[in-house]
Structure formats: C-alpha cells, structure tokens
Amino acid sequence: DAKTTQPPSMDCAEGRAANLPCNHSTISGNEYVYWYRQIHSQGPQYIIHGLKNNETNEMASLIITEDRKSSTLILPHATLRDTAVYYCIVRVAVGNAGNMLTFGGGTRLMVKP
Amino acid sequence: EAGVTQSPTHLIKTRGQQATLRCSPISGHTSVYWYQQALGLGLQFLLWYDEGEERNRGNFPPRFSGRQFPNYSSELNVNALELEDSALYLCASSPDVHNEQFFGPGTRLTVL
C-alpha cells in the first residue's frame, strides 16, 4: 500500500471547517483513499473513502486532486466532539493481501471553543 | 444494528501468563481483523480471519494466535505474555474483503 504523509497536528475553531490534508504521491491506480478517526482510547471510526471522484457523506467530504497524489478531508462545521486523531490510509480494495489497514501517525485535530 | 463488541474491557495479567481476548463482529460480517495499539507505536495489524480461516498475519511472533468460530466471532490468544504486550487490542469486522472496517471499543491488556 502507498505511504501517506499527514501533518502531525492541527487546530480548528469550533463551528469552522476543518481541512485535513494528506499526501499520497506514490498512489497506484487501483488504490483507494480511506479516512478513519480515533477519539481518545476508542476504536477507530470509518469516515469516508474514495477512488478519484470527490465524495460526501453525513460526516465529511473528501476532495481528491486530479492527479490523485493528495487529498483533503473536510469537516464542514467542526465541533468539540470532532477532536481526534485522523488517519489517511491508501490501500487496494481487492486482493489476497486482505483488507488490513496500515495506519501511519495521523493528524491530531484539536477543535477549540 | 449492534456494533462490534469485545470482551473483556480490561485485562490484567502477569508475565508468562496467557491472555484470551474475544470479539463479536457485526451481524453478517464474515471478516475479522485484530490490531495492536501499544503506547507510542500506533495501530499495527495483527491477524485477519475470514470464513473461519486465518488469511494473513502481521509481523508478530507465533505466540500471538487466534481463531474464528462458525458464528464468525473470534478469539485472540497471547501466550507467554511479556511486558511489551501491554496495549489496546482492537478488533474490526467487515462484510467482505472489499469493504470498510468497523472497529470495536478494544480490550486494554496490562501485563505486570
């Protein structure tokens, strides 16, 4: 799976949009971009994933650049409960290697009042 | 719909003992994954079970083992516990290998 690079930490004001970047310059054509988050001492929570088109769900939006070498997770109106470590993961969605996720260091997002 | 459940929530053992951790996947999910999150080391993949078979394992010694039962629940066994095994052990399930994983709350294992 391709390696990802994320800033170690970010701050965001409550109610504002949080934009979390991720670089994945070695991504392959069949690799998806996944985002998970982990609130302190809890299990990671799936947020969103995409291949090449931008995606949106009830939690967030995922913007993938046209060359697919980077992406941005957008939390449109951050709340204090969004304070967590956010992981950007790139992996192949099919194959005998299985579905296991390779977690990097992630970005620690601190939402402040 | 009930999520992934794990038991026990906390487990305290001493060096050399064995620990057994349990995981119940979301109903209908056939794949179960185990991860270890040790302090300062991040989440690391341990084992993957699908349809009762071990499909892949991470870079862990053989004293980490497990199994998946016919109802798709799973056990993780850690033999000859070492202090470095102290960690949060997370279980995840997915409906098949192509889909996202849903994580349980974890079991915190402390080895004294």
Image: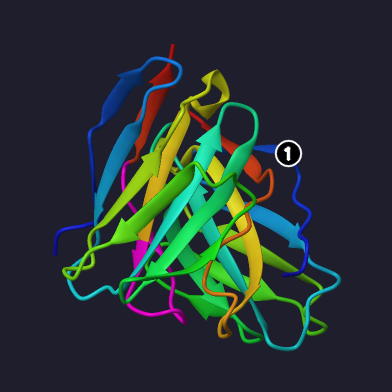
What amino acid type is highlighted by mark number 1?
Pro
Q: Nearer the viewer, residue A2 or A83?
A: A2
Write the start and end of the magenta stretch as one range.
Answer: B93-105
Determine whether the residue tagged by mark 1 lies in a helix, strand or loop: loop
Q: Nearer the viewer, residue A88 or B96?
A: B96
Kindly identify which chain the residue marked by label 1 belongs to. A
Q: Is residue B102 left or right of residue A15?
A: left
Corner quadrant of residue A10: top right
User: Of helix, strand and loop, which mostly describes the magenta segment?
Assistant: loop
Q: Is residue A78 magenta?
A: no
Residue at horizontal 31 percent and vertical 72 percent from the top: B52
Number of callouts in the render?
A: 1
Q: Position of residue B64 (x, y in %)?
A: 48, 44
Q: Position of residue B17 (x, y in %)?
A: 38, 23
Instruction: Name the residue beneath numbered marker 1.
Output: A8
Quarter of the image with the N terminus of chain B is bottom left
In the displayed orientation, state which residue is furthest to the top.
B112
Q: Nearer the viewer, residue A5 or B62?
A: B62
Q: How is the image coloured?
A: rainbow
